[in-house]
Image (cartoon, rainbow, N blue to C red):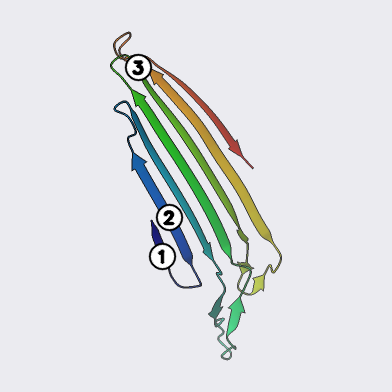
Amino acid sequence: MAYLSGDQGTQRWQMQVQHQPTEHLKSFSAFQAAKTDGDFTFQPKSQQSELPWEIRGNNDQARQTLLQWNEFKTKHLKQTLLLLYHNHEGGIPGFAANPFPDLRGQNESWLVGAKTQWPQLVRGLSLRMQLRGLR
């Protein structure tokens, strides 16, 4: 597990867990969440005079990602399952000279995938299925 921080109020948490509960089953899980205030000060450039410092707002961002991977493997069968989810929400600030104070963006995406192989029965043959979504 880790916690990181940076400029513009950035914070990020992440956690990874890997274990093998049985001889034939492996599992890996990961989660990450991050957010930032995103507001920062800047001084617009001008050739005529020095302009005052301004704060660029509506630049906050938040993201969450979840990954789950499982593998079941024996001499006769190998199955893999993958689950992935990602969410993002944040401000869309526009240009420094023309900010969009209320424009927001949000999207989600996910993936479910499975793969089955029979190494002893038919070498090189696999059955794969995927479902994907985006919002």
Lower sequence index among marks 1 and 2: 1
Task: Please give the name of the residue rendered at 55% of the width and 39% of the height, measured from the top-left corner.
Answer: 110
Amino acid, disc 2: Gln
**Residue wearing tag 1:** 4
Neighbour tally class for label 3: few under 14, some 14-19, many 20 plus, Cα within 10 Å: few
Image disc number at residue 87 = none
Which SS class for mark 1?
strand
Residues 67 and 52: in front is 67
Instruction: Give the position of the N terminus as an image quadrant.
Output: bottom left
Residue 58, percent across and down?
A: 63, 68
* Element at label 3: loop
Residue at the limit of the structure toward the right, as seen here: 102
Marks 1 and 3, how far apart at CA: 41 Å
- Residue 91 vs 68, above or below: the answer is below
Which residue position holds label 2?
14
Q: Residue at x 50, y 72 (%)?
A: 8
Q: Give the residue furthest to the top.
A: 121
Position of residue 93 measured from the top left corner of the image (x, y, whole percent): 62, 66
Q: Amino acid at mark 1?
A: Leu
Label drawn at residue 77: 3
20 relative to 12, above or below: above
Q: How many numbered marks have been drawn onto this rendered protein structure?
A: 3
Q: Position of residue 134 (x, y in %)?
A: 61, 40
In what quadrant of the picture does the C terminus appear? Answer: top right
Disc 1 and disc 2 in contact, CB within 8 angstroms = yes
Q: Sequence-wise, which precedes: disc 1 or disc 3?
A: 1
Report, in whole angstroms, how far the alpha carbon at label 3 lies from the one at label 2.
33 Å
> Could you say which is closer to the camera, residue 94 or residue 1?
1
